[in-house]
Amino acid sequence: MKMKELVQEGWKLLDITNDEKLKAEYDSWCRKVKGFLNQNGFPKGKLNEIQIKMWYTENEFSKDDTRNSIIKAIKDTVVYLDEINTISEAVISEAVGIRLIEQILNNFYLYYRSMFQNPLHKKATMSMDELKKIQIGNEYDLQRMLYALLVPIFPLIRQEAESDNGYGGMRADLYLEEYDLIIETKCTRASMTEKKLLEELGADGFHYKAKTVFFFVYDKKNIIKNPDVFKAAFVREQEKNGKNIKVIVLQPVEL
């Protein structure tokens, strides 16, 4: 059975007029969907979201309320499954996906320059004054821009995702579950030293359990004296941690 067939079965449930039969058929369909997703190795996060969509409230005092709740659950679940199916039909392999993300991060300055600094076409309705107002003030600004760049290619990427690291309180700026990949953004400030930044990256790299971790550093205050040496020094830490950790450094001269 394919996902498309499950979606079609879900829509057909809406044609059932008998309340008891609807509940029984829906419960059976839900078990079938969960079995399919488990067998095909869908991520835990997606399975949890499906469980939430499937939930309905059974009102022992009102059959109409129960039916309406089941109908809503069917529609929410079927629409969600259809979205997953559409996305999965254009899945990018892990190796290609990671390489593509790395290329986007390394060339971020090209996007920034093209979007905010290059001269506008004479017929454009935007103005350079408006564009100049958009600045990278901290990592939250950087995170927003990166998310906007990546989500059209990786629709399942999430912002501010909780990390199951055993320490609690760790939250990934950007997380792509299908590759078990985290992107953590950093923006330097006047009070930060290069040594302090290196310590922060080392601590985060140790605590995150993701298979691949990208640290995207916008060195706004130019505290990193030699970006190549900085990255090389940090990359050696990945062998000790047993993770695939990559560091990308951008400095204002590039932006």
Image (tube, grey):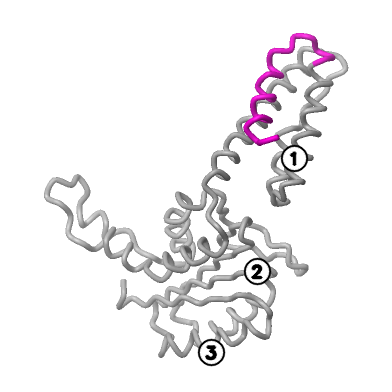
- Which structural element holds mark 2? loop
Residue 214 in the magenta stretch? The answer is no
In front: mark 2 or mark 3? Answer: 2
Magenta stretch: give its range: 1-21
**Residue 155 location, x and y as percent?**
52, 48
Front residue of 108 and 136: 108
Mark 1 vs mark 3: give the one in front. Answer: 1
Q: Which amino acid does label 3 sit on?
A: Ala
Kindly report the secondary structure that dominates the magenta region of the rendered protein. helix
Going from the N terminus, do you reach mark 2 or mark 1 first? 1
Label 1 element class: helix
Q: Nearer the viewer, residue 112 or 135?
A: 112
Q: Residue at x 39, y 65 (%)?
A: 136
Q: Is residue 193 visible?
A: no
Which residue matches tag 1? 36
**Can residue 25 be seen from the camera position used here?**
yes
Q: Mark 2 points at which residue?
A: 211
